[in-house]
Image: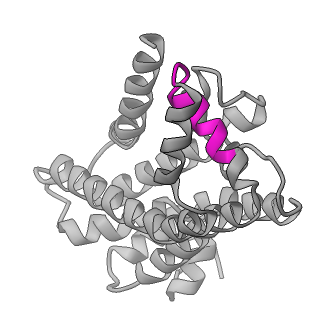
Amino acid sequence: MSENNYAVTNPIQACNDVFIRPSDVFKALSLKDNWSWIPFILVIVISALPAYLYFGVVDYDWYIGTQLALSMPDASPAELENMRSVYGTGENAAGFALFGAPAYLIVVSAVLGLYYTLVTRNDEKSIHSFFDWYGAQWWFMMPTLIASVISLGLILLIDPGAQVSQSVLSPTSLSYILTVEPSSKWFNFMSYLRLETIWTIYLGAVCLQQWTNFSSKKSIVFAAIPSVSILTISFLWTLNQ
């Protein structure tokens, strides 16, 4: 089959091809319904597992202590002890991660779906609804599966009761790559800087080019705006700390 005649014919194939032939995938998605359930399930399930497993093996008393030391550096020992009950148990944290992470991703995808709907509503070629753009977000997030799988591998190597920073949950972030300590004011900002962010922006731009009359430059700009905005706000917030 020649390159020009290549066709994406099913959602399983699309999950593979979105990494190597994203233009063909989004071309097919423009004509197909209900394909986005597959990446939705993959992203929801695999993204929730690292945090769930992390809280199952980390020394949770140590984890609480580090979090309290960072958030309440001037608190007395009695105040810190009283706050420990707020964090509950490691099982509580694992359960929250298992359901909280998917809920967060669903909300973020809805917001981004609305964003893409609004920025494309005046384009003559665009015939896609909010639900189309909402579904597209899960395809944009497919590269995050790579980071999640790496994180899973690292966590599975951790001995129970280990004292390991939560940066292991984002192994493609600069905070992990550069071993930035959680006590650093730059930790949160560096955690937002992830290698797969560039990939997700690229997929958003490819989809915009397929579904609209946007030029390549315009597509890249609009696909990058959400991530750049979050990073800018985080950077300014960090500077003011």
Which secondary structure class fits the magenta region best?
Answer: helix
Taking the magenta stretch, the answer to whether it contains residue 27 is no
Q: How is the image coloured?
A: one colour
Task: In the rendered view, tell whether residue 126 sits above or below residue 204.
Answer: below
Q: Residue furthest front?
A: 78
Tell me which segment is drawn in magenta: 63-75
Q: Residue at x 75, y 56 (%)?
A: 58
Q: Can residue 103 be seen by looking at this rendering?
A: yes
Q: Quarter of the image containing the N terminus?
A: bottom right
Foreground pick, 101 / 123: 101
Q: Residue at x 77, y 63 (%)?
A: 57
Q: How many marks?
A: 0
Tell me where residue 3 sits by quadrant: bottom right
Task: In the rendered view, tell whether residue 53 sits above or below residue 121.
Answer: below
Q: Is residue 142 left or right of residue 35?
A: right
Q: Can residue 128 be seen by looking at this rendering?
A: no
Q: Residue at x 65, y 25 (%)?
A: 183
Percent position (x, y) of residue 14?
54, 77
Q: Is residue 128 left or right of residue 16?
A: left
Foreground pick, 55 / 157: 55
Tell me where residue 174 sits by quadrant: top right
Percent position (x, y) of residue 12?
57, 85
Percent position (x, y) of residue 111?
26, 54
Percent position (x, y) of residue 74?
52, 19
Task: In the rendered view, tell whether residue 39 sits above or below residue 108.
Answer: below
Q: Residue furthest top?
A: 240
Foreground pick, 65 / 206: 65
Q: Residue at x 72, y 27 (%)?
A: 180
Foreground pick, 107 / 86: 86
